[in-house]
Image (cartoon, rainbow, N blue to C red):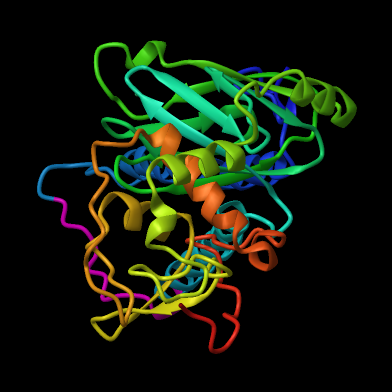
Amino acid sequence: MGSFGIPLFPEQASTFAQDIDALYLFIVAVSAFFALGVSVAVVVFGIIYRRRHEGEIGARIEGNLPLELIWSIIPTMIAMVMFGWGASAFYHVRTPPKEAMSVYAVGKQWMWKFQHLEGQREINELHVPVGRAVKVIITSEDVIHSLFFPAFRTKIDAIPGRYTQLWFEASKVGRYHIFCAEYCGTNHSAMIGWVTVMEPADYQAWLSGGGIEGTLVERGERLFQDLACGSCHLDTGRGRGPSLKEIVGTQVALANGSTALVDEGYLRESIINSQAKIVEGFQPLMPAFQGLISEDNLVALVEYVKSQSPSATTTAAAAPTAPPNPPPPGKRN
Ligand code: CUA
């Protein structure tokens, strides 16, 4: 089963798979047309205009303006079509819709770990509902990996020390491959998983069957208490650390005079490398949790802090590459 009847193509199982394939085939067709045309011209002209006797001298050609204009303007226009089409497809694929549901992914040698907000955790398996935008927030515990969903035509690197993200809306129920698309060591080729696309009702049933440790937010809240985060991060804003209420999606003023958008990446960095961005009016007192807290637990903590900003998280703010939400004025600390 392939797109356009071409058996080498993986199935088209996301809303943008067809657009991506059409763009790809357009570029291949244009390239093939010109490659073929140039090759044929080289051979044909080589025969027609060959030297026919010793001492023959070719005609001197000074140039041909109309011809030169044609072979400059037409390729420029074709290249601009590729650029415009490609840029619009890229922007679409890189910008998760606001209403997308979030799933966290962590790559490590050599497996994919997924965590759902409702608490389910999976390894090399990912369950998602059909017809719903899903945003996957990704990091790595060790080296660079790349999370690749061929049937959805989307892929993004998993980079240690930061979050990246991709999104898709599955258009077809079924089971599709997950690959690692970045060489990451001996068992790179075995870093394979499956995404299962389910009817929404089946997905709800699947969700309710797991999560013995509670939701991500509940796990994060327990960690928040175990690590005594609340003893400094008082809701009043008068603690030794800034209040965490309603900060997500806002621009926070920093001690160095700049500002930072509070998103998942900012929260993650502030936990493990707390000195990186000090909020204006606070001392750099917080210990760094680098190496002391796993990526899986970081995700839970980040989700707990996000849950303290209900007005921002209901619209799924915090997309590092998406256009930022206008920050509510005067909301910090
Ligand atoms: Cu992980 Cu290649």
Which segment did they paint magenta?
A: 56-67
The foreground one among 130 and 163 is 163
Write the residue at 27% across / 30% down. 142
Residue 255, by quadrant, is bottom left
Residue 163 rendering spot, x and y as whole percentages: 41, 48
Specify whether 36 is left or right of 102.
left
Residue 183: image location, x then y, percent = 29, 25
Q: Quadrant of residue 275?
A: bottom left
Examine the rendered structure and indicate whether residue 105 appears above or below residue 256: above
> Main SS of the magenta segment?
loop
Choose between 12 and 114: the one closer to the eye. Answer: 114
* Left or right of residue 175: residue 259: left
Residue 31 seen in the current view? no
Residue placed furthest toward the right? 201
User: Would residue 177 appear left or right of 192 to someone viewing this image?
Assistant: right
Q: Position of residue 40 (x, y in %)?
A: 43, 39
Where residue 188 sits, quadrant-wise, is top left
Which residue lies at the image location 44% right of the left edge and 56% below the top edge? 230
**Magenta region includes residue 8:** no
Location of the N terminus by quadrant is top right
Answer yes or no: is residue 199 visible.
yes
Q: Is residue 267 above or below residue 170?
A: below
